[in-house]
Amino acid sequence: MESTTLTEKTVIITGANSGLGLETAKHFARLGERVILAVRDLEKGKAAEQEIREESPEATIEVMHLDLSDLESVRTFADQFISRFDSLDLLINNAGVMTPPYAKTKDGFELQFGSNHLGHFALTGLLLPLLLNTENSRVVTLSSLAHRNASIDFDNLDGSKGYKAMKFYGQSKLANLMFATELDKRLKQHGLSTLSIACHPGISSTNLFKLGGREMPRIFKGLMNRYLQPATMGALPTVYAATDPGITGGEYVGPDGKGQRRGYPTIEKPDPAVNDEATRQKLWDVSEKLTGVTFDFNQ
């Protein structure tokens, strides 16, 4: 097994090849941490690695394949990582798909719920032994302003009874936030030092914003860059949630500006729906059943 130095932490960032994930990876590379870019497209991952190395030539970076829309890929990634490392300081559940046309994952889940929530749920559960083996490790899960006014429709999780892209995106982001909250509650119940924190980037100019799955015309990109905060700012809540010594677990971090759309990181209050313990419990049970991944906190 590969061990790390006393100062070097091991960080996994999903979707680290562009946007918020790439900016987050750059930050930890600058700090001298060991950064794993967990990406679906290895070619794009290698390009991201090169971009980071140009800024931080001495960085310890590795690209590993991870397709969150395929549970077999999630298991393979976790198996490979566990076979090589004996600790994991930071798992940043960053990757996401936003408002695609109706589609299903390889396992038959609606694409947004399957990739954004279930893929990360499974990944976290499979990597939990290493997280628990690492003192004061953290799991940071990205949600979105879109979680507000969303709900979990347990009778139509796969979208077969009707699909609205934005509604299902909101559902997946509410699921992310409920998962992060419930995970922290369970970690604390077992007296464990691992923390779970949720965050959101406000409204950031990233490649999540595409028109009908196509690249956005240059004129719109120019407008976006004027009115939305850049990915460098959008990544700050993630970095804050991952590193701030005052974090105790269960927080929801986002920008401090008007409407939480832009600004510097602060602790926010999520939508009241997140506090519904019965729904959180049901979501957890359904997620374990759908993914076949159970969380063992007694390690």
Image (spheres, rainbow, N blue to C red):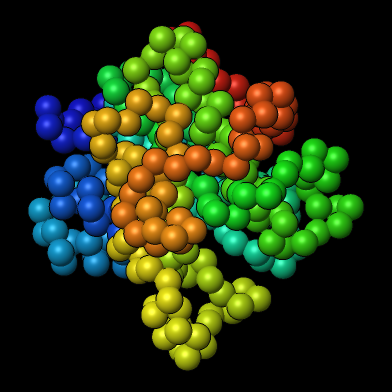
User: What residue lies at 37% left-to-right and 22% top-to-bottom?
Assistant: 194
Picture residue at 12% right of the left edge, 27% below the top = 6
Q: Quadrant of residue 230?
A: bottom left
Residue 95 placement (x, y as % from top left): 48, 53
Rendering coords of residue 127 (x, y %): 44, 29
Q: Is residue 182 above or below residue 298?
A: below
Residue with the most extreme bottom position: 219
- Please state which of residues 262 and 191 is positioned toward the viewer in this rendering: 262
Q: Residue furthest front?
A: 258
Residue 81 sits in quarter: top left
Q: Position of residue 278 (x, y in %)?
A: 71, 24
Q: Give the vertical position of 131 relative to 269 (above or below).
A: above
Going 22% across and 61% down the picture, which residue do you hit?
Answer: 52
Q: Is residue 278 visible?
A: yes
Left or right of 254? Residue 243 is: left
Q: How many labels were placed on the picture? A: 0
Give the camera-side residue of 180 and 61. Answer: 180
Quadrant assignment for the N terminus: top left
Compared to residue 299, the image places residue 134 above or below, namely: below
Q: In the image, is 31 to the left or to the right of 140?
A: left
Quadrant housing residue 245 = top left
Q: Mark yes or no: residue 72 visible.
A: no
**Depicted 198 relative to depicted 58: above or below:** above
Q: Nearer the viewer, residue 232 or 119?
A: 232
- Say which residue appears at 18% left-offset and 61% top-offset: 53
Residue 163 placement, left or right of 223: right
Q: Quadrant of the C terminus?
A: top left
- Image-based side of 86 in relation to 165, left or right: left
